[in-house]
Amino acid sequence: MKHPLGSPYVRDQISLRTLPLNEKRLQPEGEFVLYWMQSTQRLEDNWGLRLATIEADRVGKPLLIHQGLDPSYAYASARFHTFIMQGARELALRAGSLGLTYRFALRRRLDDDRRVLDRLAARAALVVTDLFPTAGVAERSQRFANRVNCRVLAVDSVGVVPAASFHKEEYAARTIRPKIAKLVDLSIEPVDDRAPKRTMTPSLLSSLGVEWLDIVNCDIAAEVSRCEIDHDVRAVSTHGGLSHARSKLDGFVSDGLHDYSERRRNPSDDGGSSRLSPYLHYGMISPLDVVSAVRTNAPTEQGDAFLNEMLTWRELSLNFCLRNPNHGALSALPDWVQRSMDAHAGDEREILYSLDELDRAATHDPIWNAGQRELLETGQMHNVVRMLWGKSVITWAPTYAEALAWLLHLNNKYGLDGRDPNSFAGIQWCFGKFDRPFASRPVWGTIRPMSLERAHAKYEVADYISRWSQDVSERQLELV
Ligand SMILES: Cc1cc2nc3c(=O)[nH]c(=O)nc-3n(C[C@H](O)[C@H](O)[C@H](O)COP(=O)(O)OP(=O)(O)OC[C@H]3O[C@@H](n4cnc5c(N)ncnc54)[C@H](O)[C@@H]3O)c2cc1C
């Protein structure tokens, strides 16, 4: 049985997931409730949208869902803009049939009108938005909440279990795993989503004076080309939107999931993991959908292996970024890593590369270059290669601080799943976060080492290397 929207279960979940961003009053004269969609780009299993719907009905007003795309976010590029707009098109197409009013606004240039959201908030009774610790969402939401006059609430739909269930920073997978196990069944009870009782009238919408984009009929590529963003980071063939995420999930559940623990360790096997991380990052697919599909379809052992990544490591990453404000700095690392870095800061680095050489995939190692080219061309990188990719830079950069900054830069500039809590946690893992000390070695100190030389023998990399062996520019010339 599904829980109705106003039921005690739903209210309990919402109160755990909601963080007020200011202490301002609900504006009784406001004409609608505004749900400002940022990092949860979906209409189902969206706790922010659920709260906005409940509140709209409570105060007897309609609900407006507004999503804006701006050229000023970090690493704004044709790649990310295209993926987001493809997802937005699906949202617009489906919103009507769900009884929802959804609008999408594109701010093309930095000097275009930047106050659309503020103008909407000035007419709203209440604003609900998404809670997300990275990609600039938390800072943007807080600045907005400080300057507008109505109440602003941020709601967490990132994890399966409400992030607030874990009050402190968790230090390892082993500490958060049993806590998730206790809460997961309670957190995935189904909810009967429904439309708000009142709808936005055409006259109210047009009185708002916002130039929304006709996202359903526009030429996305042409629109993106007019935006003041990085056009060198090009759109990729991975298509944004829930239907594409679902078909990836279906394909994975019927194929790769059955041998997940083996196949995900094979870089040459393209179907060995779900490749859902871009969709999860933008909230285009609900983690609950993924977890439920896997629980229903997988043999226990393989399902458990997948859920260890999808639940334990993903929610540990979220907890890290929410609870540790230094998640992007070396100071987030444990004491034993700090001592090790102090002791080995002056060790000679036998091989040194510049950030530019790394960016161009111009190192001596074919696995590393192949991983970087996969990232450059597709916005994704095989998980095993990503670990080797991250670890190697620790020994190739002049300092640990540069290694961290360069990895974050490359990952977040090119990765379709970049700027995610997983990005920070995954990269910090390379430096020893969530891990234990190992026998001391030059430069590595006591950080777990990973050797590219040994990886050639340990993993099936031949096909992977040959797939990504060409220089990106050569490959592009061939395509022309
Ligand atoms: C250096 C480095 C950088 C990373 N950067 C990112 C990043 O920018 N964005 C990102 O989503 N992940 C990142 N990861 C974690 C992991 O590599 C990717 O989540 C995974 O490879 C994505 O592929 P998939 O969707 O096929 O994963 P699957 O194996 O199919 O797993 C399903 C989902 O579980 C989650 N997941 C899987 N592995 C991990 C993990 N180790 N930690 C946390 N969550 C996990 C992801 O959301 C993933 O989509 C990074 C890891 C490392 C070592």
Image: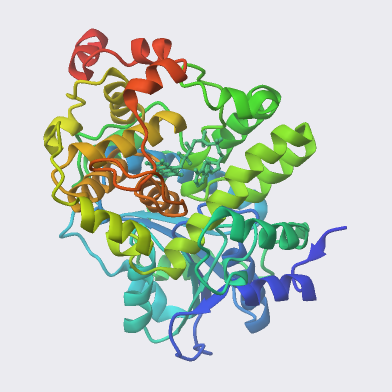
Where in the figure is residue 6, as x and y percent of width and height?
A: 75, 73
Identity of the residue furthest to the front in this view: 439
Can residue 286 be seen? no
- Above or below, 410 against 122 in this view is above
**Residue at 37% across / 51% down in the picture?**
428
**Residue at 60% across / 51% down in the picture?**
312
The C terminus: image quadrant: top left
- Above or below, 468 against 302 in this view is above
- Above or below, 328 against 418 in this view is below
Q: Is residue 306 left or right of residue 30?
A: right
Identity of the residue furthest to the right in this view: 1
**Residue at 78% across / 76% down in the picture?**
8
Where in the figure is residue 21, as x and y percent of width and height?
A: 44, 80
Q: Is residue 454 left or right of residue 124?
A: left
Give residue 361's quadrant in the image. top left
The tally of labels here is 0
Given residues 461 and 381, the one toward you in this image is: 461
Q: Is residue 28 left or right of residue 462?
A: right
Can residue 394 be seen? yes
Given residues 162 and 202, the one toward you in this image is: 162
- Indicate the colouring scheme: rainbow
Where in the figure is residue 115, as x and y percent of width and height?
A: 28, 70
Q: Is residue 11 left or right of residue 244?
A: right
The N terminus: image quadrant: bottom right
Where in the figure is residue 343, as x and y percent of width and height?
A: 22, 55
